[in-house]
Image (spheres, rainbow, N blue to C red):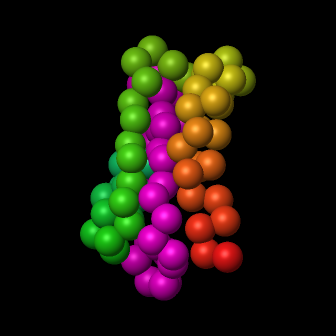
């Protein structure tokens, strides 16, 4: 995976997946999280019970993502 071959800033990553998402096999989120952790990148991985890949799912947790990512904005200026 790319995350294992490049030098990235060590900014934590938030991966959020719904347990009813039919795209999970294609997204390979678990594999990404494992590879990122192996490369020394901190990954916060969340499984949301009963959610799929819909707009409702994204809208339900958008504020949480903004809060997570805002902690790391402008960190390297």
Q: Is residue 28 above or below residue 3?
A: above
Assign the N terminus to one quadrant of the image: bottom left
Q: Nearer the viewer, residue 28 or 62?
A: 62
Question: Which contiguous range is marked in magenta?
Answer: 1-28
- For the point 32% across and 71% down, which residue is it? 40
Picture residue at 38% right of the left edge, 43% below the top = 45
> Does residue 34 show up magenta in the picture?
no
Residue 35 visible in the displayed image? no
Closest to the observer, 25 or 12: 12
Apparent side of residue 64 relative to residue 40 in the rendered image (left or right): right
How far across and how far down the image is residue 13, in percent? 48, 55
**Closest to the observer: 4 or 41?**
41
In this image, 66 relative to 19: left or right? Answer: right
Residue 74 shown left or right of residue 26 in the figure: right
Q: Quadrant of residue 31?
A: bottom left
Membership of 12 in magenta stretch: yes
């Amino acid at each position: 995976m790319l995350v294992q071959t490049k030098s990235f800033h060590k900014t934590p990553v938030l991966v959020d997946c719904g347990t009813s998402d039919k795209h999970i096999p294609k997204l390979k989120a678990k594999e990404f999280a494992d590879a990122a952790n192996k490369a020394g990148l901190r990954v916060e991985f969340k499984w949301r019970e009963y959610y799929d890949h819909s707009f409702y799912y994204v809208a339900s947790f958008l504020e949480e993502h903004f809060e997570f990512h805002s902690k790391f904005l402008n960190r390297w200026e």
